């Protein structure tokens, strides 16, 4: 895909010094003085031609040079302040995180500029802004790969009770957490993790968490079935999260392919 011209908003013609068909008035309104085959620089490199430049012409060229230098300096200073937060956050050993951060910052700058100063017709301008915003949202999700799994797990967890874990403290000061349990009567129903996983109805016997006979086995079986289903869904979240990430990568590639050369004005 190559860069293509975009229809201009009619209000922009006067601002850009164009006539009603999009040509620069500087050239379209002048009568032809002479013509030749070659390059524009061929004429400028001719010293005899340079000597013919009047004072007004030389002053105009110098003024244009000063304006270009001023604009370069102004944007350099502006970029220093606009990009200082981004530049502070980038580290040379970072790969995706640094690249994504730079892309986000630039696209946000582009969106703000396009909204305020864009010259394209509203149809094209709105499309450019919408696709750039969609890309920024995608990049925000991709910036934290672990969040894909976190979001999927959260969707599963809100469908089930808030299961608690068995916390074990050891004499050497260590501490561990294992299993998923939900209260039932005076005890707990759940599945204990570890080398020898246990599941069923538990109570604390002499300070230790032990399997005992359930006072209501039907309810215990129902809760165990629910916990087992919860474990299955949690296990599937990794695959689902990976699919979410892959889909975002594909969408990003599609957005860049279709719009990268359109994000200009």
Image (tube, grey):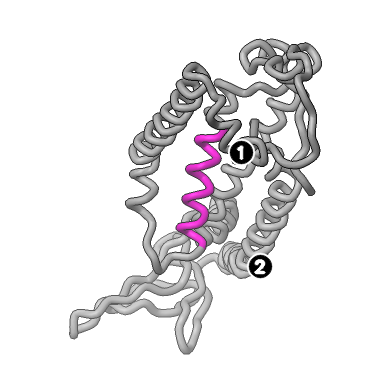
Vertical side of 65 occupied by 155: above or below: below
At which x and y percent is residue 43?
Answer: 66, 36
Residue that badge 1 annotates: 46
Going 53% across and 48% down the picture, which residue do you hit? 103
- Whether residue 16 is in magenta: the answer is no
Residue drawn at (52%, 20%), measured in percent from left and top?
A: 54
Residue 239 is tagged as 2
Q: Is residue 105 magenta?
A: yes
Magenta segment? 96-110
The Cα–Cα distance between marks 1 and 2, rounded to whole angstroms, is: 69 Å
Question: Relative to 31, does residue 210 appear above or below in the rendering?
Answer: below
Secondary structure category for the residue under label 2 = helix
Q: Residue at x 55, y 51 (%)?
A: 141
Residue 75 image label: none
Q: Quadrant of the C terminus?
A: top right
Q: Quadrant of residue 11?
A: top right
x and y, in percent, of residue 147 in the image = 51, 56
Name the spot of residue 234 as percent of width and height, x first: 59, 65
Q: Give the percent coordinates (x, y) of residue 257.
A: 74, 50
């Amino acid at each position: 895909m190559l860069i293509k011209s975009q229809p201009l908003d009619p209000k922009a013609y006067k601002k850009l010094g164009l006539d009603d068909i999009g040509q620069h008035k500087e050239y379209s309104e002048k009568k032809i003085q002479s013509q030749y085959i070659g390059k524009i620089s061929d004429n400028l490199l001719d010293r005899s031609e340079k000597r013919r430049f009047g004072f007004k012409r030389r002053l105009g060229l110098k003024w244009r040079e000063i304006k270009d230098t001023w604009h370069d300096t102004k944007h350099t200073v502006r970029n220093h302040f606009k990009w200082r937060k981004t530049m502070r956050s980038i580290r040379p050993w970072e790969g995706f995180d640094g690249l994504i951060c730079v892309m986000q910052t630039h696209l946000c700058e582009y969106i703000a500029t396009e909204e305020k100063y864009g010259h394209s017709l509203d149809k094209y301008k709105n499309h450019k802004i919408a696709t750039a915003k969609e890309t920024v949202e995608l990049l925000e999700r991709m910036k934290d790969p672990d969040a894909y799994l976190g979001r999927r797990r959260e969707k599963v967890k809100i469908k089930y009770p808030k299961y608690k874990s068995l916390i074990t403290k050891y004499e050497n000061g260590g501490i561990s957490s294992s299993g998923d349990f939900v209260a039932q009567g005076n005890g707990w129903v759940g599945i204990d993790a570890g080398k020898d996983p246990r599941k069923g109805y538990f109570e604390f016997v002499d300070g230790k968490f032990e399997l005992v006979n359930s006072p209501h086995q039907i309810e215990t079986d129902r809760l165990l079935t629910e916990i087992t289903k919860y474990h299955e869904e949690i296990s599937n979240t990794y695959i689902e999260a990976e699919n979410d990430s892959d889909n975002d990568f594909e969408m990003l590639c599609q957005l860049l392919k279709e719009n990268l050369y359109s994000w200009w004005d």
